[in-house]
Image (tube, rainbow, N blue to C red):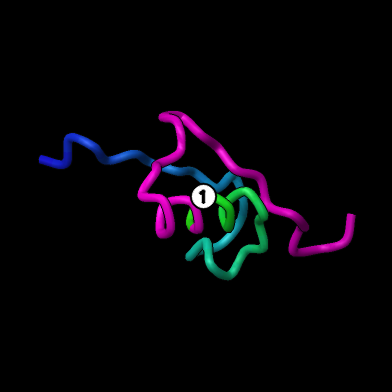
Amino acid sequence: MLGNAVLLTLDGYGHPSYQVPSACMDAARVTFLVDLVTPPPGTVCQPDETPFPQ
C-alpha cells in the first residue's frame, strides 16, 4: 500500500530509536523532513555509543 516506503534500520539496543544516539538516524530524519528524500533501501544505521561500558 505504501509504494514509496523505506525501512530504515538501527542496529542498536532498545526501542524507540529516538532514545538511541545515532548521527546516521538523525541525518536520515532531517533529510526526509526537510527534503522529503528517503534513505536508500537496505540502509542500516549504527548507534554512536553502547548502553554499557565495554
- Residue 6 location, x and y as percent? 34, 39
**Residue 13 drawn above or below residue 10:** below
Residue drawn at 58 percent across, 52 percent down:
27
Q: Residue furthest left?
A: 1
Secondary structure type for disc 1: helix
* Residue 34 shown left or right of residue 22 in the figure: left
Q: Residue furthest right?
A: 54
Q: Residues within 10 Å of mark 1 (few under 14, many from 20)?
A: some
* Residue beneath disc 1: 28
Name the chief secondary structure element in magenta. Answer: loop
Closer to the camera in the image, 31 or 43: 31
Give, as a three-letter code, the residue at label 1: Ala
Q: Quadrant of the N terminus?
A: top left
Asked if residue 40 is among those painted magenta in the image, a careful observer would answer yes
The residue stretch that appears in magenta: 30-54
Q: Quadrant of the C terminus?
A: bottom right
**Residue 11 drawn above or below residue 16:** above
Q: Quadrant of residue 21?
A: bottom right
